[in-house]
Amino acid sequence: MNKIYTHKSPFFALFQFKMLGYLLLVIGIYNSLSTDYGYIFISLPGLLLASLSDGIQIDFEKKLSREYISIAWIKFGKWNLIPDTDYVTVYIQNLSQGMNMVSITSNNPSASYKISIIGKDESQTDAGTYKSKDAALKIAEQISKKFNVECINNIKIAD
């Protein structure tokens, strides 16, 4: 694992902006090929919007973490100090999305695996959300080795 750990989130909160970017990109390229080359300038903001992503970065040497939003290859976010680490834990995060209409009710549950760095002052620093149990356990072990602390698997309790 490198000096700076970067985890791109599998769940992107600004999905509508990404879709708008793809739409502008397609419209700009199509219109520039068929009518006027000036439409290529519509593609540039579309390309930037389509490249949006978010995630978490951890700098192990400086003990800093941040949640970032990335446009193209540039990441924006405020670095926060990670307090003295007590342990690293992996647990299941259950999400439920409900939808209600006049006479129809729907509930779509899903589970993801979350890694947290717990400080000696009982503070919690997120280190990523994973769809795969094995990937989450592997990364949690690597993070715990970097901080020289114990890795606690709370997935076993929930299974």
Image: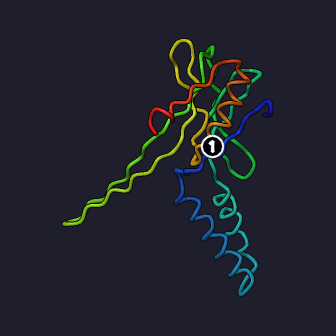
Q: From the top left corner, tell me how far across and down residue 102 is, in percent.
A: 19, 66
**What is the x, y in percent for residue 99?**
31, 59
Q: Amino acid at mark 1?
A: Asp
In the displayed structure image, the side of residue 75 where residue 158 appears, left or right: left
Horizontal side of residue 138 vs 99, given as left or right:
right
Q: Where's residue 108, x and y in %?
A: 38, 56
In the image, what residue occupies the spot 59% across and 15% down?
Answer: 86
Residue 138 appears in which quarter of the rendering?
top right
Q: Which residue is depicted at the point 59% across and 60% down?
A: 18
Q: Give the camera-side residue of 94 and 71.
A: 94
Q: How is the image coloured?
A: rainbow
Which of the image's four quarters has the N terminus?
top right
Picture layout, residue 50 above or below residue 64: below
Along the line of sight, which residue is nearer the eye, 67 or 100? 100
- Front residue (pair 142, 101): 142
* Residue beneath the point at 64% across and 37% down: 56
Q: Residue furthest bottom?
A: 34
Neighbour class for label 1 at 10 Å: few (<14), some, many (≥20)? few
Quarter of image, res 74? top right
Would you say 76 lies left or right of 105 here? right
Q: Residue furthest left?
A: 103
Q: Residue at x 61, y 33 (%)?
A: 127
Task: Say above or below: 130 vs 17.
Answer: above
Q: Furthest-right residue in view?
A: 2
Q: Indicate the secondary structure of the residue bearing disc 1.
A: helix
The residue identified by callout 1 is 134
User: Relative to residue 84, is residue 13 depicted above or below?
Assistant: below
